[in-house]
Every structure is written in C-alpha cells, then in structure tokens.
Image (spheres, rainbow, N blue to C red):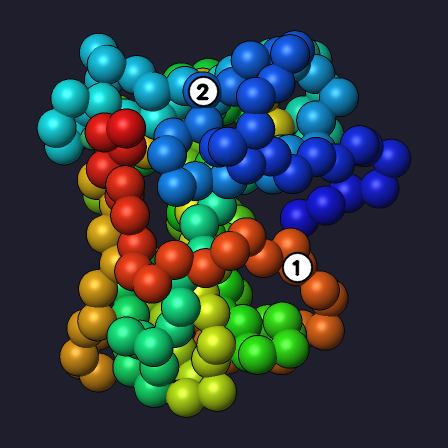
Amino acid sequence: MIRKGVSCLLLSSSLALAQPIHEIPADWHLALASPSPITVKLDHFNATSGASSVEIAREGSSTTGFVALMQATDAADYRGRRVRFSGDLKTQDVKDWGGLWFRVLDARGKTLAFDNMQKEERRVTGDTDWQRRDIVIDVSDRAANVLYGVTLNGTGKFWADGLRLEVVDQSVPITAKSSTLNAKVWLPSPLSSPRNLDFEE
Ligand SMILES: [Ca+2]
C-alpha cells in the first residue's frame, strides 16, 4: 500500500499530535502516506450502529497516497477457520477508491492471506450511500495475528461503521485466496479480541 515518493506515518490513538489533529478512535491506529491534509474523526451525524461512525477525509488535487485505520488481534479465535470481516461503508466524491482490508500474519510477520477490495468490481468510489460490504478469507492454522481495518486511497470523504469479524462456515465463498507475501508490515500491539468496531469511542 505504501507508494514511493510519499512520506509515511504510523500513528497510535495514544499519541497526541500538534498538527494536524486526528481524532483516532479508541483501540485503532492510523497509517498514512499523504502529501495533502487529512481528517480522521468520529461523525455523530452519520452512523448505522449506535451514535457515531468514523469519517476519513482527504483533500487535494493529487490522488496519490492513502489513509488506513488498522487494528490487530491475536488469531487464536480464528486459526484454521473461515472468517468474514464486514462493515457499512459510505463515500462522498471519492476519487480513486475506499474499502475494507484484512491481512493474516504468521509469527514472523509474513502475510499468509490478504484482501483490500482494490479490484474494480469491489472497490467503493464516487458517491455511495451506506452499503454493507465484506471480505471472506481462510485464516491459516499457522496464523499468529490478524490485521484489519478500512482504507481511503485518493481523495474525498469515506465513512465506516458497524464493523464485524466473525467465523463463518465453508458454504460462504471466499473473496481472496491465501498468498504468501514477504513484505514486512507494521503490527500494532495485538488485542485479545476486536474492540470498538462500531466506532462509539
Ligand atoms: Ca457506530
């Protein structure tokens, strides 16, 4: 996801930032590579679960760069099982695309499976009202952690709410095959189970 020529920052919800100010939801982390201003905040006017969603906005004329919210969880509850990562997504004037993403990592940090909805027929772009979207993936019995979140590539406004991570049976078709990628990814401290998936805090 990281593109050359663009500075990359990894931020945690525990960090206080001088400029710009990001309201990163509790238990989430922010990864970004953006040459133009971005805003991350809880939106109390647009929500599909509870009282708030998360809104990511990115300005500028260049669509180069991305913003990702991420959370890591121990894979114990999902190892050797098929999981569905789903959520409600909404966009406004998104140039390029937004989506959910999900990554399975082994104990050495190697990627065992990955999906980010980047393919043309699955990405969310332009103006869209709330739609339920999902990623279905087989978590290897060698998995140590799962890493997941939402991403906005390019510019515009993107909302997410009501995320859910659940085990499903084998009748649910997968959206991505397992693949081994050697690129190391940054792994925040894994939680024992997902938290604040509905962006209420
Ligand atoms: Ca919510």
Query: Which circle, 2 or 1, is nearer the viewer?
Result: 2
Task: Please name the residue shown 48% across and 76% down the image.
Answer: 144
Q: Name the residue at the left extreme.
A: 50
Dot 2: within a 10 Å radius of its alpha carbon, few (fewer than 14), some, or many (20 or more) residues? some
The three-letter amino acid code for the residue at tag 2 is: Glu
- Mark number, residue 185: 1
Question: From the viewer's perspective, is residue 169 above or below residue 32?
Answer: below
Question: From the viewer's perspective, is residue 112 above or below residue 186?
Answer: below
The three-letter amino acid code for the residue at tag 1 is: Val
Dot 1: within a 10 Å radius of its alpha carbon, few (fewer than 14), some, or many (20 or more) residues? few
The foreground one among 110 and 98 is 110
Task: Please name the residue shown 33% across and 63% down the image.
Answer: 192
Question: From the viewer's perspective, is residue 62 above or below residue 88?
Answer: above
Q: Is label 2 in contact with label 1 (beta carbons under 8 Å)?
A: no
- Who comes first in sequence, dot 2 or dot 1? 2
Q: Is residue 147 left or right of residue 48?
A: right
Q: Position of residue 87 (x, y in %)?
A: 27, 44
Q: Is mark 1 within 8 Å of ligand 1?
A: no
User: Rounded to the nearest whole Å, what is the CA distance between mark 2 and mark 1?
Assistant: 23 Å
Task: Please name the residue shown 45% across and 20% down the image.
Answer: 23
Q: Quadrant of ligand 1?
A: top left
The foreground one among 103 and 134 is 103
Dividing the image into 4 quarters, which one contains the C terminus? top left
Question: From the viewer's perspective, is residue 107 above or below residue 58?
Answer: below
Q: Position of residue 198 (x, y in %)?
A: 23, 37
Task: Please name the residue shown 35% across and 26% down the image.
Answer: 54
Q: Position of residue 199 (x, y in %)?
A: 28, 32
Q: Position of residue 83 (x, y in %)?
A: 29, 70
Q: Quadrant of residue 52?
A: top left
Q: Secondary structure at mark 1?
A: loop
Q: Which residue is mark 2?
A: 23
